[in-house]
Image: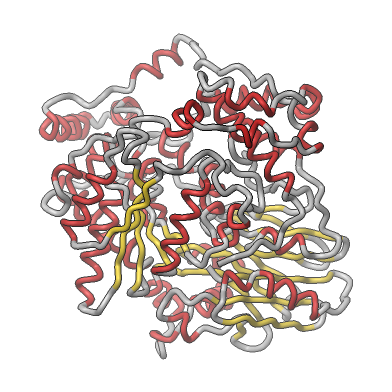
Amino acid sequence: MSGIVGIIHRNGTGIDRELLQRMTEFISYRGPDEQQIWQDGNVGFGHTMLRTTRESFAEKQPFSLDGKVWITADARIDGRGELIEKLKIKDNISLLTDPELILRAYDSWGEDCVQYLLGDFAFGIWDSRRQKLFCARDHFGVKPFYYAEVQNSLIFSNTLNCLRIYPGVSDELNDLAIADFLLFGYNQEFDTTTFTDIQRLPPAHYLIWTKEKVQINRYWTLPTNGYIRYKRANEYVEHFQELMETAVSDRLRTNQIGIYMSGGLDSSTIAATTCQLLRKRKEPFDLKAFTVVYDRLIPDQERYYSELVAQAFNIPIQYLSADNYQLFDAVEQPELQRPEPTNLSLLAISVEQIQRVARHSRIVLDGNGGDPVFYSWGAYFHVLHLLKKLEFSQLFTDITQYFQNHQRLPPPGLRSRVKQWLRIPPPIPPFPECINPELSAKLDLSARWQHFHQEKPLRHPIRPEAYQQLTSSMWPFLFESCDPGVTGFTVEVRYPFFDLRLVNYLLAIPPVPWCIHKELLRVAGKGILPDLVRLRPKSPLAGNPVSILLQQANLSQVNGLATTPTLTKYVKQDALPLVTQIESERGEVWLNLYLVSLNYWLQRLKLINFKTT
């Protein structure tokens, strides 16, 4: 989770060392262990170090192998053994740092090096031999990467507010990004930010800067042609367990770890795998679980189920009771300031949770990714695929396997298909009336609203629903919202279910029976997880805390809040006081919470150097 920054001038002007130092110091909260800058003529890099792996204790950045090619990186490279083998490195393997591996890969394969990299990464490489800057972001966008072109310069960082320090980067707002926040809760575009001058490098893309141009290219697309078949059911389970162990192990290159553990199947699987791996090492370790619970506000069972897992694996667990939090609690505190608009209504809970994790460890494992990668509408696409290929025996095998486990046939998922055949469009909620009509007309927001709620083209032959979920712009938004550049805390969140090897496997196996109701996790967890957890059905919260708080809370502080003049560019003048009056429609409730959150954010737009802990 180290901090990175880079500046390059096209006209050959030398780097302002004082400015580079100031930008590096700004992101020092990301990496309190060490800060360094490097410059050579018209190029300069800055780096702030947070050591989270054994190898990182030997790491120095910015780094070069030969003094001609330099790197600044926020990276955790997975599959190190396989990469080292491909690079034919024989000596001092245990001392190789992740940035050095990236540089060696670049030296061997040039821009194609990203085809060989696994893990979470954002980096910039200056190649003085070719007078070229090469930057890249990981496959799913776990690590942020922002850049701006100002006159004859390009600047980049993994921290958005760092770029706002640079002279010439304006605070002009991107109206479409803000409209997206009000309508959907996050920016739908992969390559823009809330600020017109600052862009995102999308996930699975690289950037090349030369004196002639800036070029953005995609280097990877989630595959649609994987197809894995085994003769024995056990082979699917064993392969999954092997990949899950690898995914967790590559994220465990330390002995002090936190884990977000809800008591659901995804986080419990990660917890079980983590414990097994740590105990195999026969080294001291410090693993602690963190769980947010409701004891009174809603009938929440997370305390009960997470306690079962904690007891089964002897994991210390710390609970954060969310019952006493009110909407927009502590919203004035600097820890709740965010680089871009976000829903502030219950953000104080997340801030308190990340503070607790930060007191214990620098990394925390997270179960996000389990839902989208197993997401399934039913057996329809799988059955259709096998019928087209005339694989009747395989179809019989898959359905029989499901029937043996559940004593019923798999859900067919025909309802949505029948509606498509009959050309019955899905219901689309009415367009929110509080949006400024002039802005709506200018940006054609009504069409954007319609497109968002329409069914999307099917892009995977047997797992279109999972493919759609995994390629949503929601995920980079979620990853960035948990990144230290946003939270201000030195905690790196790691997501085993977004391991590329695991995702590729789960998209390629038969969804019947393995993906319906997460059957693969349930079978793999037999004899490992407590059965009450392993066989637990998918359980969303039994109530909506926000709706209950809207009915119970005194929101005079919100309804009496002064409206920022800029807000009226995006919403009608009288929209802000309506937050407590339209709780009947869930979509409208969230929309108006976004509206209040945007108002708070606009009031603090100039406060970019927020206090960090």
345 displayed left or right of 605: left
Residue drawn at x 55%, y 49% as measured from the top left: 476
Residue 90 in percent (x, y) is at 40, 87
Residue drawn at x 76%, y 71% as measured from the top left: 7
Residue 376 in percent (x, y) is at 35, 33
- Return the residue nearer the eye: 390 or 340: 340
The quarter of the image holding the C terminus is bottom right
Asked which colour scheme the image uses, the reply is secondary structure
Residue 220 in percent (x, y) is at 53, 53
Can the viewer see residue 233 in this picture? yes
Residue drawn at x 55%, y 23% as measured from the top left: 454
- Return the residue nearer the eye: 23 or 447: 23
Residue drawn at x 13%, y 44% as measured from the top left: 531
119 displayed left or right of 437: left
Q: Quadrant of residue 462?
A: top left
Can the viewer see residue 108 in this picture? no
- State how many labels appear: 0
In the image, residue 202 above or below residue 458? below
In the image, residue 43 above or below residue 318? below
Residue 474 in percent (x, y) is at 53, 42
